[in-house]
Amino acid sequence: MQILLVAAGRRDPFEGATADYLARAEATGRQLGLTGPILKTIEAPRALSGPARQAREAQLLLDVLPEKARVVLLDERGKDVGSRAFANLIGREREAGAASLAFLVGGADGFDSSLLDSLGSRVAARVAFGRATWPHMLVRLMLAEQLYRATTILSGHPYHRD
């Protein structure tokens, strides 16, 4: 199963750390039948704001998703999940035969309703990293670390400790 991390927004100061965790996740995930994670970044024109920006980001996100990819939305209104539950989500999608699983990180204004309507039943989950609101640049890094942690949990590696 291919893992994608698709994020709205510009390049960020955490790129090095994010790339490191993604490389670790790729190495550990290989033995689990996972490929990637591949990071794709989209950016709507800065001249747009509010609903117009959300709508453009939604279209750009849809444009880079594989046609039948299952999707996990990173959303502050999503469900709080621990690391083990996050790993189990990935494991369930892999076992169900999903060809790809894409984790979407929206821009500063969140996801446009048109994105949710377009994705429909392809949405596997809406996940939050706690009740706090996080900058989308930091969420990318946190997601990369959780993807690595998930691969270690699924493979029995001792990185994660309960």
Image (cartoon, rainbow, N blue to C red):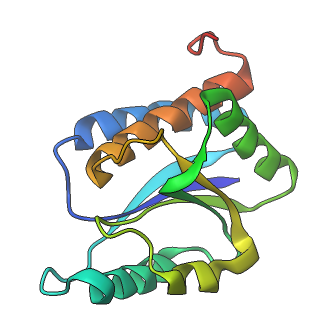
Residue 114: x %, y % from top left: 52, 87
The residue at the point 34 percent across, 39 percent down is: 18
The residue at the point 72 percent across, 28 percent down is: 154
Q: In the image, is residue 49 above or below residue 72?
A: below
Residue 131: x %, y % from top left: 45, 42
Q: In the image, is residue 74 above or below residue 113?
A: above
**Visible in this render: residue 33?**
no
Q: Quadrant of residue 81?
A: top right
Q: In the image, is residue 97 above or below residue 152?
A: below
In this picture, residue 159 sits left or right of residue 156: left
In this picture, residue 161 sits left or right of residue 111: right
> Residue furthest toward the right?
96
Depth check: give the residue in front, 31 or 47. 47
Point out the image quarter for the C terminus: top right
**Visible in this render: residue 32?**
yes
The residue at the point 41 percent across, 33 percent down is: 21
Residue 50: x %, y % from top left: 26, 81
Q: In the image, is residue 137 above or below residue 119?
A: above
Depth check: give the residue in front, 26 or 80. 80
Residue 113: x %, y % from top left: 51, 82
The residue at the point 47 percent across, 54 percent down is: 38
The mark total stands at 0
In this picture, residue 146 sits left or right of residue 10: right
Q: Quadrant of residue 96?
A: bottom right
